[in-house]
Amino acid sequence: MGENMAESADDSAERERLVEQIRSAKTPEERREAVRALAKRNIDRHRETYEKLANE
């Protein structure tokens, strides 16, 4: 259980890092890149759920 909590903390830290990149982006391109990275992270993180829904 401790390992899952560590992964959750790491995941949360990564999300916060990406959100901060979005907020602090100096150009629209930097902002788009950070938004895409956050979206990819969310897709990868929830892939199993999406696959289950698709196969219902």
Image (tube, grey):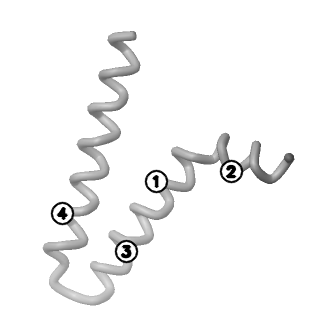
Residue bearing the label numbered 1: 41
Residue bearing the label numbered 2: 50
Q: Quarter-wise, where is residue 43 in the image? A: bottom right
Disc nearest the viewer among 3 and 4: 4
Q: What element carries label 2?
A: helix
Q: How crowded is mark 3: few (under 14 residues within 10 Å), some or many (20 or more)?
A: some
- Residue furthest right in the image: 56
Q: Which residue is drawn at 85% across and 47% down?
A: 55
* First of labels 2, 4 by sequence position: 4
* First of labels 3, 2 by sequence position: 3
Q: Is mark 1 on a helix, strand or loop?
A: helix
- Residue furthest bottom in the image: 28
State the image coordinates of residue 12 (x, y, percent, origin top left): 29, 42
Q: What element carries label 4?
A: helix
* First of labels 3, 4 by sequence position: 4
- In whole angstroms, how far apart are the C-alphas of marks 3 and 2? 23 Å
- In whole angstroms, how far apart are the C-alphas of marks 1 and 2? 14 Å
Q: What residue type is labelled 2?
A: Tyr
Q: What residue type is labelled 4?
A: Glu
Q: Is label 3 in contact with label 1 (beta carbons under 8 Å)?
A: no
- In whole angstroms, how far apart are the C-alphas of marks 3 and 1? 12 Å
- In whole angstroms, how far apart are the C-alphas of marks 3 and 4? 12 Å
Name the mark on residue 20.
4
Q: In this view, does 1 lie above or below 15?
A: above
Q: What residue type is labelled 1?
A: Arg
